[in-house]
Amino acid sequence: MVIKLLCRTAKTITFQIVNDQCFYLEENTEIYVNGVKEKITGKNVNTVYELIPDKEYTIYVMNSTGRSNDLKMRTKKAASVLDIREFGAVGDGKTLNTLAIQTAIYSAPENSVIEIP
């Protein structure tokens, strides 16, 4: 079983489990991040979320056919991580948060991450 990197950001890593299927795997497969089982997937393309910027990670997958190769990489650097709640956003499903989001974007230094929880 082979996995290959598709994309990495400061807080995510997206990878493909290479196989002959179009979208779904033939069986559920466990995803491990730094040796800890993160989740079980049935899809070819997967993303690991909520990672720490500029940190080294090792990802592999495992199912009844065996273990994949190790995918070793470092997440991208982020100048800063800004949470839109720090700019007045409210996650109540009713409040319009456009101003808070726009303020966070305009306040962010280059290579920053804006978190929208």
Image: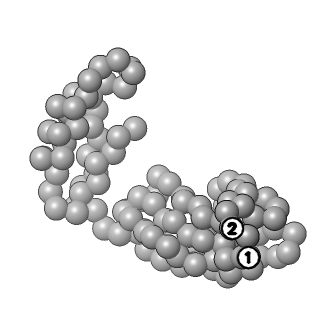
Residue name at image x 47 percent, y 52 percent: 50
Q: The N terminus lies in which quarter of the figure? A: bottom right
Give the amino acid at mark 1: Asp
Q: How many labels, in total? A: 2
Q: Quadrant of the C terminus?
A: top left
Label 2 is placed on what type of residue?
A: Cys
Residue 60 in view here:
no
Residue 91 seen anywhere in this rendered image of the structure? yes
Tag 2: Cα neighbours inside 10 Å, few (<14), some, or many (≥20)?
few
Q: Residue at x 59, y 61 (%)?
A: 46
Q: Residue at x 35, y 17 (%)?
A: 94
The x, y position of residue 70, in whole percent, is 63, 79
Q: Are marks 1 and 2 in contact (CB under 8 Å)?
A: no
Q: Position of residue 90 (x, y in %)?
A: 31, 24
Q: Which mark is residue 113?
A: none
User: What residue is shown with label 2?
Assistant: 22
Residue 20 is labelled as 1
Residue 29 placement, left or right of 112: right
Answer left or right for 26 relative to 48.
right
Cα separation, mark 1 vs mark 2, equals 7 Å
Left or right for 85, reference 117? left
Q: Residue at x 48, y 77 (%)?
A: 73
Q: Position of residue 79 (x, y in %)?
A: 22, 61
